[in-house]
Amino acid sequence: MNNQPNPEPAVAFRLDAPTGGANRGVLLSAPAQWNGYLESLAFAPVTVLASLLQSRRITSRQIVEQCLRRIERLAAPLYCVVSQTPFDAALAAADRADAEIMRGQYRGLLHGIPYGAKDSFATRELPTTDGAKRYASRVLGYDAVAVTRLENTGAILLAKLSMGELAMDDVWYGGQTRNPWNPEAGSSGSSAGSASAVAAGLLPFALGGETWGSIVSPCAVCGTTGLRPTPGRLPRTGVSALSWSMDKIGVITRSVADCALVMDALRGADAGDLSSMDAAFDCDLSAPLTDLRIGYDVSGFAALPDEQIALFDDAKARIETMCGAALVPVELPALSPEYDALPMTIIGVEGATSYAAFIADNGLNELVRQGEDNWPQIFRRAQSVTAVQYLQAQQLRARLQAEMTAALAGIDVYLTPSCRGESLRYTNLAGQPEVVTRAGFAADGSPVALSVVGNLWREDAALRVAHAFEQMADLSERVPPGFA
């Protein structure tokens, strides 16, 4: 049985990145209003928790204890937690953070903050299961680079979070991860547990990953904030590979500022991921939007159900007010039918390669889902795809990348209803970064999400627009019933 995360091949998909220039980092404010009740911080963003830690009005131990209690009390019905750092070890890490802060050795806004990681991120002491029963006890003995970088900031890993089997949807060997807003429904996936845990107030933030919708979709469904960056922005070293040319890692949080903060801690090249690189990131979330040209995805807005049209018209109007100019209609490429199978051709072939040892050892028959559109059949079909067909698919992808670049010429970002129209498919193939934030709530009380898509390597512009909308819309106080 293969006991290692699937390795990246020698040739990696790589996008040119901007270099040089000033890098002022992420400028964040950290409001510190607090009523003194610990439970009222269950849904507080990292910036608020960090402010309270800096001012020593609260300790890391208190935050960690609260998260552990909430996990113990609320996680089981959500099927979102796979494994946990032992209670004593978690508290010891919190005590170390508190001692460092008291000595003036403050490492930054993530110091002493607990978090969780999707169960595809290698961890040296906890199992890394990829959502598959075969890997339920697989302890790799080392950390993914993202986990190491967070450890260096003083953040504290509390839990490994559920993911759909081998990174598909929200069903894993332990059950179906549930949506805190509607526990009878799934959370979507495959970063299922990451979105569910953050939405339920179990953890302030979580690491996730996306190949085709696996951050954006669960964030949209669970009402969390998410960032899927440009491929190569964050190193994937130590994260199980599904599709080496399409996999991205990202973050799921409670605010746009938190997305910027965590991404800033994770970014930069690592020798273990040949696609990763050092790219400039200069993000001032307090800057006005008047220097940005903002578009909207015509096809995405046309795909809205009638009951959501007014909500998204209001979102567009608010952003027009902030940028001081009318939004520009953006027509995404109209593609021929040959593109329809493109994502799954690439993902299927690369996934069947990544999990070749698992497949050879009869692992596909052990997976929970065995339908026509699930991994067992997809991987079996992929094994009959020829090298010529695979390379033709990558050629089509390169053509789409050029067409997307042309479609976005002259604008900095565009708005689209999350998971509507073709934007999600196109941007995962072409690489544009996407920020997901709440746009409002449907009549049944479920969250509705707005995505802000930036040009390649322009996470800063997408974050600025999403942050400004988030602050104006002021939707963060609403939490899932039964989890307050």
Image: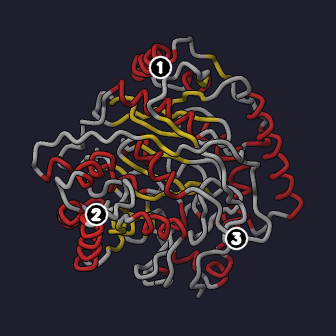
Residue 216 makes an appearance in the image: no
Give percent across and percent down for residue 423: 62, 35
Where does the N terminus fall, quadrant-wise? bottom right
Residue 8 disc label: 3
Q: Earlier in the sequence, mark 3 or mark 2?
A: 3
Residue positioned 62% across, 65% down in the render = 242
Residue positioned 76% across, 42% down in the render = 339
Amino acid carrying label 1: it is Ile
Amino acid carrying label 2: it is Ile
Of all residues, the one furthest to the right in this rendering is 388
Provide the residue designation for mark 1.
Answer: 319
- Between tags 3 and 2, which lies in front? 2
How far apart, in angstroms, are the residues tagged by discs 3 and 2?
A: 38 Å
218 w.r.t. 137: above or below: above
Give percent across and percent down for residue 354: 67, 72
Give percent across and percent down for residue 389: 85, 57
Provide the residue designation for mark 2.
Answer: 101
Q: Earlier in the sequence, mark 2 or mark 1?
A: 2
Q: Secondary structure at mark 3?
A: loop
Please tell me how crowded label 2 is: few (under 14), some (14-19), or many (20+) other residues with Cα within 10 Å. many
